[in-house]
Image (cartoon, rainbow, N blue to C red):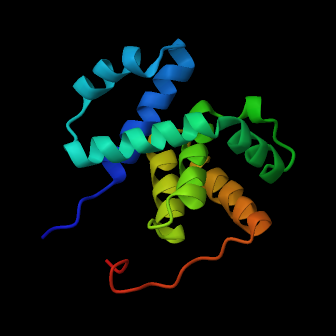
Amino acid sequence: MPKVSFRPARVFAMQLLYSMEVAGQTVGEALPGILAAQEITDEQKKYGMKLVDLVQAHREELDDEIKAASVHWEIDRMAKIDRIVVRIAMVELLYVPDIPTKVAISEAVQIATKFSTDNSGTFVNGLLSGFMQKKGIVTQPKTKETQS
């Protein structure tokens, strides 16, 4: 059975959170436009919505963590997409134990690189590395399930 890629779910979550933040929309208002803009499976949508719900439930905590991990950067000066991508990665690191640490970080870096500025991948990687160090999160070793 082929393994489902959750990158589309992460991109979906990022786009939904971005739309909500920029346009001040609710999930219900933003969702139809985001779903119309891309094709994702039901499983990907379910995981993406889980990420959106986790980010919304823990946003204040996540933003405090971003502030603590970012040296010499005000959170309001960060690119919106970078902030959102970091929030998504942080909820995966903190609240989704079956996602390997390396996967959460790699996905965040790749999504930021594709959808944000030229320096976003490096910025997101550095911010998440600082967060992991502060929290004592270690990178899990590869297992048969996480090797690709």
Residue at (59, 76) in percent of width and height: 139
As drawn, the residue found furthest toward the right would be: 72
Residue at (20, 37) in percent of width and height: 39
- 42 horizontally vs 124: left or right: left
Where is residue 123? Give x, y as percent.
66, 51
- 78 horizontally vs 67: left or right: left
| Residue 68 against residue 125 in the figure, above or below | above
Front residue of 117/99: it is 99
Where is residue 14? Give x, y as percent.
46, 37
Query: If the image is split into quadrants, where does the N terminus sit?
Result: bottom left
- 10 horizontally vs 148: left or right: right
Residue at (75, 29) in percent of width and height: 76
Residue 32 placement: quadrant = top left
Query: If the image is split into quadrants, where does the C terminus sit?
Result: bottom left
As drawn, the residue found furthest toward the left would be: 1
Front residue of 45/122: it is 45
Where is residue 30? Give x, y as percent.
39, 19
- 74 horizontally vs 61: left or right: right
Front residue of 28/76: it is 28
| Residue 21 against residue 54 in the figure, above or below | above
Residue at (51, 46) in percent of width and height: 112
| Residue 112 against residue 110 in the figure, above or below | above
Where is residue 59? Give x, y as percent.
65, 36
